[in-house]
Image (tube, grey):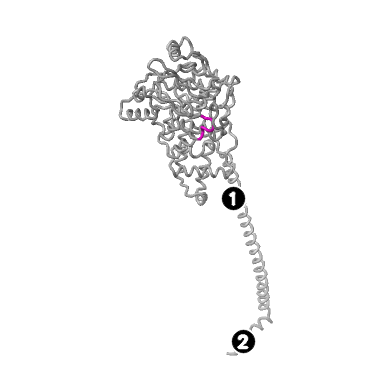
């Protein structure tokens, strides 16, 4: 097996053949150039070559063209003669048509196996980037994640996070005492951003079964690296979701893969198409994270190639780490274009045979100025190069063919059916139902206790009234008896005499 990848060669007016050494495939790279200058074909031939070398590859198919990797080129293709002529010109003697082991993926589950991750795996930093949160809102999101860890609440999908934020708003006063001010207005803003994500289709992305990287970083029984093609044409309608997803995937690779030092060939190669979408309006913290991942993931055996129109789309600190460079034509019609052209030329090791700036402006479609790492990882002198033709089909396959490939995929059926196990949403709902039940029981107990108290007081009043009535009844009976006795006495003769005697005595005393 060869220890290098043939990228292109020379001919009249061109330099020597250019090959990418496999042992430097994890030193990252850049494929740049204006629209229509051949970036996609360069990406395609690199993916083919890495796969043949036994290196798994991931790439995003922004325009749908890269699905052709799954089929061999054809002699009846309109560019067949041009391909054969170029192969002869650059001495690509073993050029032939062949297909490659492609696995199709799609965040929306339409043109490939569904790609999912959990809210917890995405983390607050990337979610904040995805939702364009302010610093204060990002702080609240971090608090929510901390509480989820402390309370054992699994954050798997969007409804889990939404439920946790509702709980946080309801308990903001208590939580604020521990973590600082929690504004209900900020929580509301985050909830609205989550709705936007749902409308963009992110609800399909967050959940289970989550993607297992081992299903991407795999080879065929014959030893070819699997080419993972993400359908990104629809995803480009949500560019921030696209950029955040690819950064998440890079972060997962960095966290899960072991250190391998300097392997003879990469363990995995990652192509980041439309790379400017990652860096546009990105906060400093995110840029620093990308820089850190790009710098350290090399030791995990992962190579990252950024594909973009202008090199200045990539921050300078990251651009400086990209050792392998294929620069297609840049158009220079505006002052900004001229500045970008000059900057691009200055990143190459000069060649005394030509002016790099002029070469970048003048190369045609399928041509490029190329500098690849050579002995001791030193960039080679820049060369004008004819890029080799692809062996697989140039252009997309049709939908019937795509469905057939998906049905015969080694991963068919593993990710298609979503799972919804107990997580934060269900756990908080159960807590709320239990609290409501306990509150209802407490209310019932309170009502019952109040009723018992009223009955007790009523019974006491009745007993008191009864005792009072009995005493009054006894008193009235004695009085009545005395009065009746007196009346009987007065009605008798002796009684009358006694009364007169008493009255007479009274008058006499006067």
Contact flag, marks 2 and 1 (Cβ < 8 Å)? no
Q: Residue furthest bottom?
A: 509
Q: Nearer the viewer, residue 376 or 102?
A: 376
Mark 2 to mark 1 CA distance (whole Å): 79 Å
Q: Is residue 501 above or below residue 223?
A: below
The range drawn in magenta is 296-302
Residue 331 lies, in percent from the top left, at 34, 24
Which quadrant would the N terminus be assigned to in this image?
Answer: top right
Residue 291 lies, in percent from the top left, at 46, 36
**Helix, strand or loop at disc 1?**
helix
Q: Is residue 63 left or right of residue 113?
A: left
**Chief SS of the magenta region:** helix
State which mark lies toward you, 2 or 1.
1
Mark 2 closeness class: few <14, some 14–19, many ≥20 residues within 10 Å: few
Q: Is residue 120 left or right of residue 237?
A: right
**Helix, strand or loop at disc 2?**
helix
Q: Residue at x 62, y 88 (%)?
A: 505
Q: Nearer the viewer, residue 282 or 17?
A: 17
Residue 481: say if magenta.
no
Residue 298: say if magenta.
yes
Q: Residue at x 59, y 26 (%)?
A: 414
Q: Earlier in the sequence, mark 2 or mark 1?
A: 1
Residue tagged 2: 504
Which quadrant would the C terminus be assigned to in this image?
Answer: bottom right
Q: Nearer the viewer, residue 218 or 86?
A: 86
Residue 300 lies, in percent from the top left, at 54, 32
Residue tagged 1: 443
């Amino acid at each position: 097996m060869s220890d290098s990848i043939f990228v292109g060669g020379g001919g009249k007016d061109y330099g020597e053949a250019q090959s990418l050494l496999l042992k430097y495939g994890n030193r990252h790279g850049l494929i740049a150039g204006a629209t229509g200058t051949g970036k996609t074909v360069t990406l395609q031939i690199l993916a083919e070559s890495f796969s043949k070398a036994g290196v798994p590859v991931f790439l995003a198919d922004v325009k749908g063209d890269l699905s052709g990797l799954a089929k061999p080129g054809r002699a009846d293709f309109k560019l067949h003669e041009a391909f054969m002529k170029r192969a002869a010109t650059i001495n690509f003697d073993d050029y032939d048509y062949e297909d490659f082991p492609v696995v199709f993926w799609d965040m929306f589950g339409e043109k490939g196996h569904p790609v999912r991750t959990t809210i917890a795996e995405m983390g607050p930093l990337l979610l904040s980037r995805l939702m364009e949160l302010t610093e204060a809102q990002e702080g609240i999101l971090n608090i929510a994640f901390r509480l989820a860890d402390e309370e054992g609440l699994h954050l798997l999908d969007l409804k889990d996070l939404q439920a946790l934020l509702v709980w946080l708003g309801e308990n903001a006063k208590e939580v604020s005492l521990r973590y600082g001010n929690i504004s209900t207005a900020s929580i509301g803003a985050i909830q609205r951003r989550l709705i936007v994500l749902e409308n963009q289709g992110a609800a399909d992305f967050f959940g289970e079964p989550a993607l297992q990287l081992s299903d991407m970083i795999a080879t065929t029984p014959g030893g070819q690296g699997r080419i993972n093609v993400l359908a990104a044409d629809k995803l480009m309608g949500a560019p921030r979701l696209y950029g955040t997803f690819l950064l998440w995937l890079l972060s997962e690779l960095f966290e899960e893969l072991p250190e391998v030092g300097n392997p003879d060939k990469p363990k995995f190669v990652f192509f980041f198409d439309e790379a400017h979408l990652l860096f546009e309006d990105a906060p400093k913290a995110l840029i620093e994270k990308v820089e850190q991942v790009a710098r350290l993931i090399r030791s995990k055996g992962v190579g990252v190639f950024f594909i973009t129109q202008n090199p200045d789309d990539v921050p300078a600190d990251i651009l400086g780490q990209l050792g392998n460079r294929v620069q297609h034509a840049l158009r220079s019609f505006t002052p900004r274009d001229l500045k970008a052209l000059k900057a691009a030329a200055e990143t190459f090791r000069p060649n005394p045979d030509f002016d790099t700036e002029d070469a970048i402006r003048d190369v045609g479609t399928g041509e490029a100025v190329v500098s690849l790492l050579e002995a001791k990882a030193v960039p080679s002198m820049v060369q004008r190069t004819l890029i080799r033709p692809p062996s697989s089909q140039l252009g997309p396959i049709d939908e019937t063919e795509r469905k057939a490939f998906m049905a015969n995929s080694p991963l068919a059926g593993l990710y298609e059916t979503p799972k919804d196990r107990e997580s934060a949403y269900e756990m908080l709902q159960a807590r709320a139902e239990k609290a409501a039940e306990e509150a209802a029981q407490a209310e019932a107990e309170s009502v019952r206790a109040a009723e018992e108290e009223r009955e007790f007081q009523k019974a006491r009043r009745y007993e008191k009234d009864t005792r009072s009535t009995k005493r009054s009844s006894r008193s009235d009976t004695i009085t009545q008896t005395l009065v009746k006795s007196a009346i009987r006495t007065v009605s008798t003769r002796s009684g009358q005499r006694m009364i007169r005697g008493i009255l007479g005595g009274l008058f006499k005393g006067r």
